[in-house]
Amino acid sequence: MATGMEHEEASGETIKTFKELGVTDVLCEACDQLGWKVPTKIQVEALPVALQGRDIIGLAETGSGKTGAFALPILQALLETPQRFFALVLTPTRELAFQISEQFEALGSSIGVQTTVIVGGIDMMAQSLALAKKPHVIIATPGRLIDHLENTKGFNLRALKYLVMDEADRILNMDFETEVDKILKVIPRDRKTFLFSATMTKKVQKLQRAALKDPVKCAVSSKYQTVEKLQQYYIFIPSKFKDSYLVYILNELAGNSFMIFCSTCNNTQRTALLLRNLGFTAIPLHGQMSQNKRLGSLNKFKAKTRSILLATDVASRGLDIPHVDVVINFDIPTHSKDYIHRVGRTARAGRSGKSITFVTQYDVELFQRIEHLIGKKLPAFPTEEEEVMMLTERVAEAQRFARMELRQHEEKKKRSRDEADEEDDAEGALGVRNKVAGGKKKKRKP
Ligand code: AMP
């Protein structure tokens, strides 16, 4: 397997170990147990300065190993001066929050670190109870954290020592600026701050001025660069044969783990059903699924009980899925920047990976824009048309089944909505009696 080590040897740089960067023995062992043999570039840059207690502005993307770059210094400081509510990590999405917490727990398990994830879509009460246990590290999305700061009795962050703002550009793009300002007002000024961002936008610069003290800049990749160990391909095919080509490629590259990107929730669901009908272990992840289902999908995929994850762009950034070997852009991304984020799911932390982008007669212009953005022409992925055509019949049958299942699913959903509506109408008519009788009106599902 290709490793970051080979890469650095090839470029003639000397390789530093975690220990040489100043990481304490017990945490070096934790890295070793996670299979982190050598530090990644951002870790080499950030760890020594962070361990000296400096603020950091890190320009690095997900996949670079940035979580380790901020988690290790925090854990090391926590070892020196154990304290509850020691660090807060702000992140834009729920999925990212859970991934960061997993890395904290994996690195900190031998030192007994306790973390809590505070994100929307999960019961406030359960979170309040978790906060009452006073964890060492809180990983939160800004909105829900504010909710707790304002409404959860006895909870405050007045003793906080470390603040991390992860994917700051996304936090700010999601209009969390007010929330972030509010949080900055209720935590101590005397603290260490690490700000990580994939891009340096005006808003990020403003936040840097407001929140960091004399920071050291650590940058590992320039904007819009795709990683070196990523082999990127395209296939140019008629739109009506997309499904058959997908099945062909999954067969050709069998044994790998795949992430397939679709443009809509509906197509994600449909394609997952289609592939399942053909015997593949495919699982969907999109915005119309409940938070629990999304986490469930992700965990099944992570546990490798499923080898194909189908996702919309909701999932295209920030997800930590270490073993994706191949990214397939089944539907071409409409925004070329999403291309970078999507293919960033593979070839991470020094591993190699492939991406294949489906280009139909309708997508040529979008594809040219992508090539322009990444500054290179991509090679075509070799396919045998005859073999693909042999699949079309079976694929057509699976398509019919998938459409039927999708329709049944829709009808079931509609029926349960209609039933809820009917109940509401009936209850509306009985409203007065209900009130008198103290009856409860049933809440309609959103
Ligand atoms: P991140 O950019 O923090 O989301 O990390 C991406 C992936 O790289 C995660 O799965 C980490 O477990 C992994 N990783 C982080 N540091 C290293 C390292 N030094 N060597 C190998 N893998 C790493």
Image (spheres, rainbow, N blue to C red):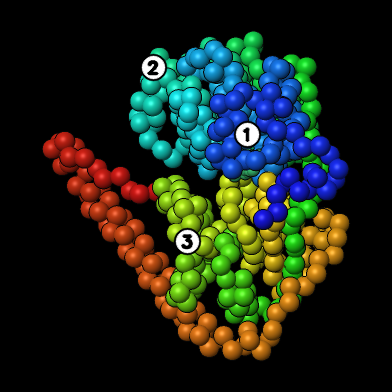
Q: Determine whether 160 is above or below 332 in the image.
A: above
Q: Determine whether 104 is above or below 230 in the image.
A: above
* The quarter of the picture showing ligand 1: top right
In front of the other: 287 or 164 = 164
Instruction: Identify residue for label 1.
Output: 68
Q: Determine whether 278 is above or below 217 in the image.
A: below
* Residue 380: x %, y % from top left: 77, 73
Residue type of the residue flagged with mark 3: Arg
Mark whose residue sits in front, 3 or 2: 3
Other-residue count near label 1 (Cα within 10 Å), few / some / many at <14 / 14–19 / ≥20: many
Q: Determine whether 281 is above or below 17 in the image.
A: below
- Total number of numbered labels? 3
Q: Quadrant of the N terminus?
A: bottom right
Instruction: Identify residue for label 3.
Output: 306
Secondary element at image label 3? loop
- Sequence-wise first label, 3 or 2: 2
Residue drawn where x is 59% and y is 50% of the image: 322
Asked whether mark 1 lies closer than 8 Å to ligand 1, one says yes
Residue drawn where x is 37% and y is 71% of the image: 408
In this view of the protein, can residue 297 be seen by the observer?
Answer: no
Secondary element at image label 2? loop
* Residue 289: x %, y % from top left: 45, 54
